[in-house]
Amino acid sequence: MAVRNVSGDWMAHQSNGFTARFSIVQNGGDLTGSANHGPDQDGHFTRSMEARGTVTDTEFLWTISWDNGTRGRYSGRFESDGRIAGVSVDLEHPTSQATWISDRSFGMSG
């Protein structure tokens, strides 16, 4: 099955004013890597302890364990222009959500 190539460094701009920066290593549809987000009101960024996910030709799922003890999930679908648009959720506080969109477009792997 063909999948989108989401590897490398890119950003997810969130509706709550935060920007998440992803660094993704891709092996087929499996994703690993790291992330950071911010800035908070003091200008600090939160870094990931672990980040894992999956990608298909239509969907992206990325779960991050942050160094502040929270976990976030970024889920999205590929738009017609190849960018990803979706929702981020704080898994410890599921009512804390924001929409997001990738800063770039993604083509198919291979």
Image (cartoon, rainbow, N blue to C red):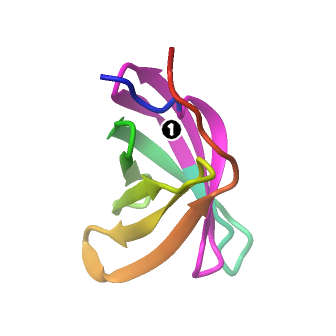
- Circle 1 sits on which residue? 34
Q: Is residue 47 left or right of residue 2?
A: right
Task: Give the x, y percent position of residue 57.
Answer: 39, 37
Question: The disc labelled 1 sits on which kind of residue?
Answer: Ser
Reply yes or no: does residue 12 show up in magenta.
Answer: yes
Is residue 4 placed above or below 49 in the rendered structure?
A: above
Task: Give the x, y percent position of residue 67.
Answer: 44, 53
Residue at 63% from the left image edge and 52% from the top image edge: 81
Outermost residue toward the front?
80
Residue at 53% from the left image edge and 56% from the top image edge: 79
Looking at the rendering, which quadrant does residue 87 occupy? Answer: bottom left
Is residue 11 placed above or below 42 in the rendered structure?
A: above
The residue nearer to you, when weighing 28 against 31, is 28
- Quadrant where the N terminus sits is top left
Residue at 42% from the left image edge and 42% from the top image edge: 49
Task: Give the x, y percent position of residue 97.
Answer: 40, 79
Q: Main secondary structure of the magenta part?
A: strand
* Tag 1 secondary structure: strand
Query: The magenta stretch spans which residues?
Result: 6-35
